[in-house]
């Protein structure tokens, strides 16, 4: 059965709420323990005289309790905010903290090239922007996906993974990570890192106090007996905070493991949906069982990021803290008749001799044939150029040269606001770009994302201004131009302006989103062409949304729709599913799906982060 990614995103959202609730309970427990520790440690409460609830109520120094509680809440809150700020850069920050280095999109290393090809294939199959890929210098077979959204995602893969796995197995691992992207796990995982850092913070304070106390122990011994008593109490408090920190670590890891394990089973199943080859991911799991290094990650930050990985990143002293299900159970779910035997590790030579150009991962994928044909239909010239920063910019510019009457002015803008080199690349590529069908143009746009993220901040800002000028040259904003500009803004600008990826609370009430939803529906309906077909599409969408047929179609105003885009992106998963079903109904109203409509659906799904797979796309 196919995974309903909207439902799974909603489940991940609910898991996040559960995580926050458990975190709140943990903070309350920390408050109680810390208050008791400080009050007793400093002698502010005489336990011998506390023999009833009334004695507690009247005997406690409540102003001090209030001060301690406030201090704990502020300290934990600051710890969470600091970690959240550190992670504001999204997936690339996580990848670099784990020792990853970004693979050049134009790399010609056979192992790296094969990995990049597999990632591109899975991105097209999952209909998400092609993410940058980071290589971790680890012998273990492991991988992860990190980021706040599909546009911000990165894929991290270990050296052991690309050396030990064949192509199908590597694709299974990558498909598993794309499942986490579409299941909505990435944002939850990053929040988990920040929240658990807050829970553990009091323990860090205790360690600091113990270290400070050890350096002054000599002076304490020479002080008066009263001071000795106070110093002893402070050291007791420090030791107690360390104990509380361990308790926080205990419960924090328990929460992390409980939330993570079931998501791993789901990602395994979803990976089969992407790759159409259960032997791929099952084979990768078997390789792990046979590999001496397993899935271990030796980086110092592996523990706090352990729930991100494909396999167990660190050794656990108890299975209840495992962030992943046991290896044999994962394999059994994929291959119920597995005999329990692990294969021998492969040599790197066997892997290198495999083909490195993009190709279908398995010959047993008939229902994925259309996507693979589409990938093969892209001229190799454009595929190779999409991996180079300058040429990727030229491809985007060429996609905007759609109006012959204004092309001369646009060419002039490229020369003046871009560069002569960029203009030369546009001139070389524009004919090949414009010869593509619209669905292939959208796919080519997807492929440019990693190369565009290799630009410097100043280079991207200059490129962004150029794109704005090119779209303004014809004095009107068409739907294709709107899609291109907003796609670049959402998927590439997020790399240079991370704050764009930190959105607010999910809106679960469709009524609050009716205005942006109907504006988007009107734009899709008008793309149908003829007035009667447009009205037919509009009514079909209204019916799906449960709105009256008398609802007036709003005027076409794409700039206003841009302002509403963040609200549509912040829709709760099931509300987003409702809006997406209305869009699909509008496109299907005339029982004919053209290349233009297929391209529109694919682009809108990318732009609005809709977990939709165009498996029947026309080529």
Image (cartoon, rainbow, N blue to C red):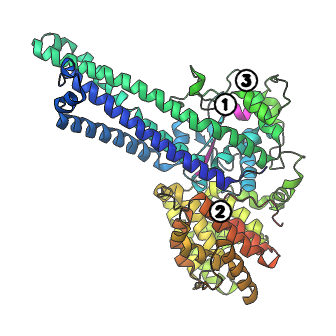
- State which tag comes first along the sequence, 3 or 2: 3
Quick one: quadrant of the C terminus? bottom right
Could you say whether the residue bearing mark 2 is in a helix, strand or loop? Answer: helix
Q: Which residues are magenta?
A: 153-164
Residue with the mark numbered 2: 577
Pick whichever, 61 or 599, lies toward us.
61
Q: Position of residue 237 (x, y in %)?
A: 27, 22
Residue 138 sits in quarter:
top right
Residue 343 is a magenta residue: no
Marks 1 and 2, how far apart at CA: 30 Å
Badge 3 is on which residue?
291
Residue bearing mark 1: 325
Q: Position of residue 154 (x, y in %)?
A: 60, 47
Nearer to us: label 1 or label 3: 1
**Residues under labels 1 and 3: Cα distance?**
18 Å
CA distance separating discs 3 and 2:
42 Å
Circle 3: is it few (<14), some (14-19), or many (20+) Cα within 10 Å?
Answer: many
The answer, for residue 450, to whether it is visible in the render is: yes
Q: Is residue 582 above or below residue 573?
A: below
Residue 382's place in the image compared with 29, above or below, is: below
Can you give x and y, in whole percent of width and height, for residue 184 in the image?
60, 50
Percent of width and height locating residue 329: 73, 29
The residue drawn where x is 56% and y is 50% is: 13
The foreground one among 289 and 248 is 248
Whichever of callouts 1 and 2 sits on the residue coming sooner in the sequence is: 1
Nearest to the observer: residue 207 or residue 546: 546
Structural crowding at the residue carrying mark 2, measured as other residues with C-alpha within 10 Å and reported as few (<14), some (14–19) or many (≥20): some
**Does the segment drawn in magenta span residue 156?**
yes
Left/right placement of residue 588 relative to residue 244 reads right
- 1 or 3: tag closer to the N-terminus: 3
Q: Residue at horizontal 49%, vertical 44%?
A: 191
């Amino acid at each position: 059965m196919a995974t309903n990614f909207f439902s799974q995103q909603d489940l991940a959202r609910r898991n996040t709420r559960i995580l926050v609730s458990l975190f709140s309970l943990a903070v309350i427990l920390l408050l109680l323990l810390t208050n008791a520790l400080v009050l007793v440690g400093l002698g502010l409460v005489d336990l011998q005289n506390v023999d009833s609830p009334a004695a507690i109520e009247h005997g406690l120094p409540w102003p001090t309790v209030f001060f301690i509680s406030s201090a704990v809440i502020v300290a934990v809150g600051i710890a969470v905010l600091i970690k959240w700020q550190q992670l504001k850069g999204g997936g690339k920050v996580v990848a670099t903290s784990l020792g990853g280095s970004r693979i050049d999109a134009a790399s010609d290393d056979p192992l790296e090239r094969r990995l990049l090809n597999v990632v591109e294939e899975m991105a097209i199959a999952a209909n998400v922007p092609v993410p940058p890929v980071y290589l971790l210098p680890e012998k273990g077979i492991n991988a992860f996906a990190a980021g706040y959204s599909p546009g911000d995602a990165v894929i991290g893969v270990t050296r052991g993974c690309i050396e030990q796995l064949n192509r199908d197995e590597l694709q299974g691992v990558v498909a598993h990570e794309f499942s986490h992207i579409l299941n909505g796990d990435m944002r939850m995982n990053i929040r988990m890192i920040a929240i658990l850092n807050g829970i553990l913070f009091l323990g860090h304070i205790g360690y600091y106090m113990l270290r400070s106390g050890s350096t002054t122990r000599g002076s304490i011994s020479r002080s008066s007996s009263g001071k000795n008593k106070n110093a002893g109490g402070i050291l007791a408090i420090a030791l107690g905070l360390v104990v509380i920190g361990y308790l926080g670590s205990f419960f924090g890891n328990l929460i992390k493991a409980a939330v993570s394990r079931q998501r791993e089973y789901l990602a395994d199943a979803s990976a089969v949906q992407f790759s159409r080859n259960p032997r791929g991911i099952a084979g990768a799991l078997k390789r792990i069982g046979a590999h001496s290094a397993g899935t271990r990650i030796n980086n110092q930050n592996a523990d706090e990021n352990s729930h991100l990985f494909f396999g167990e990143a660190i050794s656990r002293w108890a299975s209840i803290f495992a962030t992943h299900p046991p290896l044999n159970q994962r394999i059994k779910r994929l291959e119920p008749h597995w005999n329990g035997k692990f294969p021998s590790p492969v040599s790197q030579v066997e892997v290198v001799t495999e083909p490195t150009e993009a190709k279908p991962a398995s010959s047993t994928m008939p229902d994925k044939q259309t996507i693979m044909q589409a990938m093969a239909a892209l001229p190799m010239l454009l595929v190779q150029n999409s991996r180079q920063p300058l040429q990727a910019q030229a491809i985007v510019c060429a996609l905007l040269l759609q109006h012959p009457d204004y092309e001369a002015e646009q060419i002039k803008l490229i020369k003046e606001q871009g560069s002569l080199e960029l203009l030369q690349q546009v001139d070389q590529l524009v004919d090949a770009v414009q010869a593509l069908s619209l669905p292939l143009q959208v796919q080519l746009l997807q492929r440019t994302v990693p190369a565009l993220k290799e630009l410097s901040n100043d280079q991207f800002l200059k490129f962004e201004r150029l794109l704005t000028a090119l779209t303004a040259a014809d004095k009107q904003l068409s739907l294709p131009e709107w899609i291109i500009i907003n796609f670049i803004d959402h998927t590439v600008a997020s790399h240079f302006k991370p704050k764009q990826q930190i959105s607010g609370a999910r809106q679960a009430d469709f009524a609050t989103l009716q205005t942006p939803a109907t504006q988007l529906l009107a734009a899709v309906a008008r793309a149908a062409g003829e007035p009667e077909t447009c009205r037919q599409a509009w009514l079909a969408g209204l019916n799906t949304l449960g709105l009256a047929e008398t609802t007036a179609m709003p005027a076409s105003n794409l700039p206003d729709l841009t302002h509403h885009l963040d609200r549509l992106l912040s829709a709760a998963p099931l509300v987003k599913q409702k809006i997406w079903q209305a869009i699909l109904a509008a496109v299907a109203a005339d029982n004919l799906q053209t290349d233009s409509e297929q391209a529109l659906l694919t682009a809108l799904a990318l732009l609005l982060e809709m977990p939709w797979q165009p498996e029947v796309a026309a080529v």
